[in-house]
Amino acid sequence: MKITSKILYVGVTSVVMLAASCSKDPKSPGLEYMPDMYRSPSYEVYTTNPNFPDSLTMQAPVKGTIPRNYTFFNYPSSNEGYEAAGRDVKNPLPVTEENVAEGKRQYEIYCTHCHGSTGQGDGSIVAIGKFPPPPSYSKGNSSRGGAMRDLTDGKVFHTITYGINLMGAHASQINPEDRWKIVMYVRQLQNDNKPVGSTTTVSTDSTTVKP
Ligand code: HEC
């Protein structure tokens, strides 16, 4: 009796499973026991949504929303904005070896091909004659007046943010913090690639070193 019911149980189960797995359409996934697992009841990002007047699921952030840790740079892309930023804005980050090193790394990604690795305006696209040379950071003059080596933190930041003449804006690809690190490195290049603030000159001539 026990054996018979076992055989019957196995038999019936196999028939039911076999029947359930057979389908005319070879691409059909078969019976769906829990459709919610396959078809999410939530709205997909790009599907229409009856809950909003514009029927979009992805809603724009509320007007005036700013990202966390966002720093304001409330200076327009104009000569006045450039001068005002140059006068009032200071680099908010401390000049540390790490920050300058990161600025150099970013500079090599975004700026070297035009400005050159030491900021002399001899980048690779200038060298192949595809682009007019930008002025040298240490020896050239700014098209907005004054020597390049006198450009302040705020002016350099303004330039990276909005661009200037042939140089494009970099605000969309470099976040403000990284822009400030690049500014640090540019300040160093203005100073003939010597760390800014360093007043000591290291002599390499051993005969002049007194004990
Ligand atoms: C496509 C080439 C190109 C790239 C990339 C580029 N620049 Fe420039 N940059 C120029 C040119 C050309 C000028 C001179 C524009 C002028 O004054 O007419 C310039 C000018 C500048 C100036 C001087 C602005 C002033 O106040 O006169 C600074 C500072 C500067 N660039 C920094 C940067 C930094 C930092 C980067 C990288 C984030 C960068 N540039 C990327 C081409 C470039």
Image: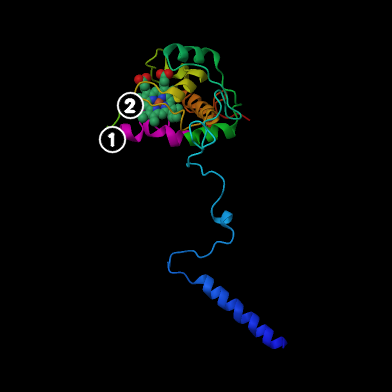
Q: Which residue is mark 1?
A: 128
Question: How far separated are the C-alphas under marks 1 and 2?
Answer: 11 Å
Q: Residue at x 56, y 27 (%)?
A: 62
Query: Mark 1 or mark 2: which comes first in sequence?
Result: 1
* Image: 42 above or below 83: below
| Image coords of residue 45 (percent x, y) | 51, 42
Q: Residue at x 72, y 88 (%)?
A: 1
Question: On the rendering, which quadrant does ligand 1 occupy?
Answer: top left
Q: Amino acid at mark 2?
A: Pro
| Image coords of residue 186 (percent x, y) | 48, 26
| Image coords of residue 81 (percent x, y) | 47, 14
Q: Which residues are magenta?
A: 107-128
- Asked if residue 38 lies left or right of residue 135, the reply is right
Q: Residue at x 60, y 79 (%)?
A: 12
The image quadrant where one finds the C terminus is: top right
* Image: 26 above or below 68: below
